[in-house]
Amino acid sequence: MTGITTQMVFLAFFGAAAVWFGIVVFRTHSMVRSALALLFSQTAVGVMFLLMQAEFLGVLQIMMMATEMSVMAIFMVMFMMDPGGMGAMDMTHQKRLSLWAGGIGLGAALAVIWLADWGLPGGTIPEAADQTAGLGLELLDRSMFIFQSAALMILTAMVAATMVAIAPSEGRKQ
């Protein structure tokens, strides 16, 4: 086995940061702080992609999560009674069921990791530019309809949420 490289150290650091901020999402009493912790967690995942030379996925992950969490924080401030978490709010629901589901999921994931026959490692790994080009072709070929449909649904949801947030004047005639 070769020695530990700087890339491996940073990968482990950002992996631990992603897990830590993922835990913080459920430990805070503020919806806004929860959104920011989720943003930091997913940004750490994006940095991990960058470290593994998957530049397209890394930048896409960071850009998407920054936009998504910003919109989420804005909507939480608009709709939540206590977005700052100053009151006694609990961010977890159905704790016992959640713990059981998480434990079973962890056990299943570890069983798949340890018991699966992963086969031999691939012979050659394409360069980062070739991987990005292949991913682009995949996204623009058979997956384009799925992405366009998802974008239309997200836009519709944002327009509907904005319409719900704007209450009509009571004295105005329809």
Image: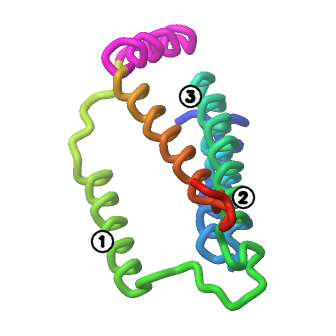
Q: Secondary structure at mark 2?
A: helix
Vertical comparison of 126 with 42: above or below: above
Q: CA distance from mark 2 to mark 3?
A: 21 Å
Q: Position of residue 136 (x, y in %)?
A: 47, 14
Quarter the C terminus occupies: bottom right
Q: Which residue corresponds to the image point at 44% horizontal and 85% vertical from the top-left?
A: 95
Which residue is denoted by mark 2 in the rendering?
A: 36
Q: First in sequence, mark 1 or 2: give its number.
A: 2
Q: Earlier in the sequence, mark 3 or mark 1?
A: 3
How crowded pointer 1 is (Cα within 10 Å; few <14, some 14-19, many 20+) is rated as few
Q: Which of the two marks, 1 or 2, is nearer to us in this view?
A: 2
Q: Position of residue 104 (x, y in %)?
A: 30, 71
> Residue 107 colored magenta?
no
Q: CA distance from mark 1 to mark 2?
A: 28 Å
Residue 41 position (above or below residue 139): below
Give the label on residue 57, or none: 3
Marks 2/3 in contact by CB < 8 Å: the verdict is no
Would you identify the image quadrant in which residue 38 lies? bottom right
Residue at image position (48%, 32%) is 151
The residue at which mark 1 appears reads as 104
Q: Amino acid at mark 3?
A: Leu
Give the Cα separation between the discs numbered 3 and 1.
30 Å
Left or right, 79 with reference to 110 = right
Q: Mark 1: which amino acid? A: Ile
Of the two numbered discs 3 and 1 in the rendering, the one whose residue sits closer to the viewer: 3
Q: Is residue 94 visible?
A: yes
Start-end of magenta stretch: 123-144
Q: How is the image coloured?
A: rainbow
Relative placement, left or right, of 149 versus 77 is: left
Q: Secondary structure at mark 1?
A: helix
Based on the displayed image, in which of its 4 quarters is residue 99 positioned?
bottom left
